[in-house]
Image (cartoon, rainbow, N blue to C red):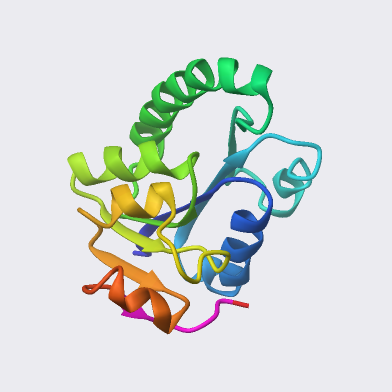
Amino acid sequence: MKKKVLFIASTGGHLDELMQLKGMFNDYDYHLITEKTKSTLSLRDIHKGRVNYLVYGTYTTFLNRLKYPFKLIYNTFKSLILYFKIKPQYIVTTGTHTAGPMCLIGHIFKSKVIYIETFANSRTKSKTGRLVYKFADFFVIQWPSLQELYPKATYGGWIF
């Protein structure tokens, strides 16, 4: 029986990084979660029955910053529902805010959490990486310079 693996990432660069792993999707009973945007709708056609969406949440503008806490709360509850629907043994993510709650839920309910710190950060910790590093079962960095910030992490090289 194939292991159940949940792949989750925010849309944009984080999802682009995660999709570099798509060659291994069929090795597992996999499921994919990302934010619902025009650019991610096609994933449903490609990965039939294996994709769910969370609400797109960004805080780049003032108005979005006001809405963001409510979207985060909604996405956290939706993540909890999806977690029990999927029941993954493993959670693999490249971040960011969309994945944070799912990683914490997975940790609480004993899924293995594999976090790949974003390629975009070569000298600083991401907010989600800072949180998940504390409990991830396997934490991967893409830059050797991050080894100093994440001493227990594994340098895996670039995902691209």
Q: Is residue 37 left or right of residue 32?
A: right
Nearer to us in this view, 133 or 75: 133
Image check: 3 left or right of 109? right
**Which quadrant of the rendered structure holds the C terminus?**
bottom right
- Residue depicted at 50% across the width and 71% down the height: 122
- Asked if 143 appears above or below 14 in the picture, the reply is below
Point 59% across, 43% down: residue:
34
Which image quadrant is residue 156 in?
bottom left
- Front residue of 85/95: it is 95
Q: Main secondary structure of the magenta part?
A: loop
In the rendered image, the quadrant that contains the N terminus is bottom left
Look at 48% across and 56% down and name the residue there: 30
Q: Is residue 75 rendered to the left or right of residue 149?
A: right
Is 109 drawn above or below residue 73 in the view shown? below
Residue 14 to residue 156: above or below: above
Range shown magenta: 154-159
Whether residue 97 appears in magenta in the rendering, the answer is: no
* Relative image position of residue 39 (x, y in whole percent): 79, 45
Residue 17 position in % (x across, y down): 60, 65
Question: Residue 83, how many percent across, how many down?
Answer: 37, 36
Q: Residue at x 30, y 68 (%)?
A: 149
- Count how many numbered circles sit on residues in the image: 0
